Every structure is written in structure tokens, then in C-alpha cells.
Image (cartoon, coloured by chain):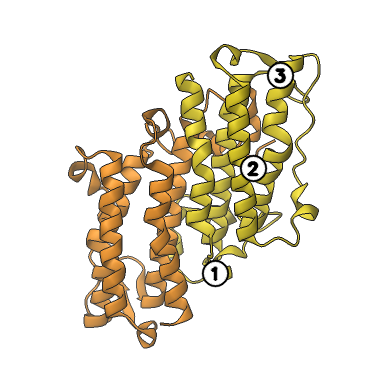
Chain colours: A yellow, B orange
């Protein structure tokens, strides 16, 4: 296993543990607020979206690259697939579902990909040619991007409670104005 | 213990566990980048800053409110105290130091504060009058704000590796332009 694959899966393996540490049993007073006020996502939506990636995106695209190269573009990532699918699941259920899928997918990745595959190319339906290396790096950074949304939602749930300290808390100021700078 | 104290300490208790799950033993390729390109903080700086809060801020201010009310303003939060203090510590050392301090401070909080104290007031040196309830909510949201910076730095370390996918990754786009919107 190359340093690249090892270091990328190192982060991918952590995400379920981080989500458990952050969310398992967390009171709803912290989890019922969206990351941004308009069209934002609650932690429940974020974990659902991460589940969609495990179900239909990352490993499917890896296989597409290995089997078809640039000849067959990837399927689109269904960004709102979680809305109907997960409507009745609790947040804790979703975290455990995600953890199972992630473990299965990392085992699949280990079977499928080795060092010499990383420069193989696939075809993104909008972005054009991409490499398997870029796909795997994106898988990890996509985790970081979306887990960050959970932090913004959790902070937002206590926007009023911090009183005048809001002026110093960039995570709250940016929910109202993305370019805001904390005092 | 009120719901408020219970729900606030619920988040405060998680932060060391989240930092361990995210950072313990993480390769330097993920941890050596700042959250924003100019004057940003690496994860090492962020955890150092959280340690400063435990050493000098949150419990000290709680005691100041309980003992002096609004008569004696809080000391200022030394935002860069970590720079000299932690220069030789590893990131893993800092996470464990933070975990010990946080556990001690939550035990202190439990001894010091009960329901009927939450509306007691103190004097912030810049913000003016604040309540103990606001201080405790800020302690938790301050954790969320700074742990978010760790995510931005980790993502930023792989800004180049994701290739064209950067256009979809808000966490990377916002490092260059805070008002950027992912495609």
C-alpha cells in the first residue's frame, strides 16, 4: 500500500469514530439546527448524504475507472437521495449505518486498488477527466467538508445563548454572512 | 443539574474524544496546513488555544462571576499564549493535555455552579455585562468554532490532490474566498 492510499484511508477510517464521539446520544437541542439559515442541512441530513456517497458514489466510481477508464462517465451523485430514504431514521441509526457502510467500502477499496492504479483516469459527467488518486483524495476531503457542516449546525443551535460573545465566534457570524470576520 | 448545564457539559465532555478520534496518530501530511492561507492556525495551534482556555479562561471567569459579580472585570483571553508554551509539544501530547484539563475543569464546574447561578452577571473587559449562562454556552460554541478550524486545515492540506473536484468542495473554496459557493 502506498503512502497515499494509507494516508487517505487513515482519514476515511476515522470519520465514523468522530461522528460517534460527536453525535451519539447528543441532546436534540444541539442537533435540530441547519448549518446555514437558508436551505441548510441538519446533522441528520449530513450523515444521510455521507451514506449516499457510500451506497452509490465512491466505490462505484472506483470500479467504473478500473473497468471502463474514461469510456463510461460516472453516474451523477444524487445530492438529495437521503431526504426520502432516511426520513424515519434517528441520527444515531444513521451514524451506525454509515459506520457499517464505510467499513465495508474500505475493505472493498483494499481489494480493488493498488499503487499502480492511482493514475488511471475516469470521466466525471461535469468535470471531465479525473484520476483515481483525485477521487480518493476527494472522498476524504468530502468527509471533512460535510462534518464541518455538523459543527456549524451545532453552533447555530446556540446562536442566541452566547449573548454578546457572538461577535467573537466566527462559526456563528459566518452563518449570517459568509465573509464576516470575528472581532 | 439543569437541562442547560447538562446539555452544555454534554458537548464539552465530547471535545477531547472527538480530537482523539480525529487527530491521534494522524500523519503529518494532514496536519501541517493552516485553516486559512494568511495568518491561519494549524491543528497544533488550535489545540494549544483550547488548552489556554482551560488554563486561564473558562473556570477563572466562572469563579470571577461567582465571587465578584460585575465588580471586577475578567482578565483578557490571551489568544496567542500557546505559541511559546507549546512550541516543543507534539500534537498528540497537546490533545492529551487538553483532555486532562477539560476533565478537571468539568469536575470543578460541577462543584462550583448550580441552576440558580446561571443568571449571575460578570463584566467582560470589552463586551460589558454577560451572564454565567452565556459564558458556559460560549465555552461549548468556542470548542465547535475552533475544532472547525482543524477541519479546514486538514482539507487545505489536500487542496491540490482533489484536482477539479475543488469546485464542489466549499471547505476548500472558502479558504481562498470566504464568500465562495460550491458548484
Q: Nearer the viewer, residue B157 or A167?
A: B157
Question: Where's residue A162, x and y in %?
Answer: 45, 68
The first of marks 1 and 3 along the sequence is: 1
Kindly report which numbered mark, 2 or 3, lies closer to the viewer in this rendering: 2
Q: Quadrant of residue A123?
A: top right
Chain of the residue under label 3:
A
Which mark is drawn over residue A65? 3
- Indicate the secondary structure of the residue bearing disc 1: loop
Residue at x-position 54% and y-position 69%: A27
**Where's residue A33, x and y in %?**
62, 63
In contact (CB < 8 Å): disc 2 and disc 3: no
Mark 3: give few (<14), some (14-19) or many (20+) Cα within 10 Å: many
Q: Nearer the viewer, residue A116 or A34?
A: A116
Mark carried by residue A101: 2
Of circles 1 and 2, which is in front?
2
Q: Is residue A52 left or right of residue A29?
A: right
On the question of residue B32 being in view, the answer is: yes
Q: Is residue A85 above or below residue B10?
A: above
C-alpha separation, residue under disc 1 versus residue under disc 3? 42 Å
Mark found first going from the N terminus, 1 or 2: 1
Whole-percent x and y of residue A110? 57, 26
Q: Chain of mark 2?
A: A
Q: Report the Cα–Cα distance between label 2 and label 3.
A: 21 Å
The answer to which image quadrant residue B44 occupies is top left
Which residue bears the numbered disc 1? A27
Q: Secondary structure at mark 2?
A: helix
Decide if residue A55 is on the left or right side of residue A110.
Answer: right
Amino acid at each position: 500500500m502506498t503512502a497515499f492510499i494509507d494516508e487517505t484511508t487513515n482519514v476515511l477510517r476515522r470519520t465514523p469514530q468522530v461522528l460517534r464521539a460527536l453525535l451519539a446520544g447528543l441532546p436534540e437541542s444541539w442537533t435540530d439546527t441547519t448549518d446555514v439559515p437558508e436551505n441548510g442541512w441538519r446533522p441528520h441530513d449530513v450523515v444521510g448524504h455521507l451514506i449516499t456517497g457510500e451506497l452509490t458514489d465512491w466505490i462505484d466510481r472506483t470500479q467504473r475507472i478500473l473497468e471502463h477508464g474514461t469510456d463510461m462517465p460516472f453516474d451523477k451523485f444524487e445530492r438529495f437521495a437521503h431526504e426520502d430514504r432516511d426520513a424515519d431514521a434517528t441520527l444515531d441509526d444513521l451514524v451506525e449505518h454509515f459506520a457499517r457502510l464505510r467499513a465495508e467500502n474500505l475493505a472493498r477499496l483494499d481489494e480493488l486498488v493498488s499503487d499502480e492504479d492511482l493514475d488511471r483516469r475516469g470521466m466525471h459527467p461535469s468535470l471531465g477527466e479525473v484520476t483515481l488518486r483525485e477521487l480518493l483524495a476527494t472522498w476524504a476531503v468530502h468527509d471533512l467538508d460535510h462534518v464541518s457542516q455538523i459543527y456549524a449546525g451545532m453552533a447555530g443551535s446556540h446562536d442566541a445563548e452566547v449573548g454578546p460573545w457572538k461577535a467573537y465566534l466566527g462559526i456563528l457570524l459566518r452563518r449570517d454572512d459568509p465573509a464576516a470576520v470575528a472581532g
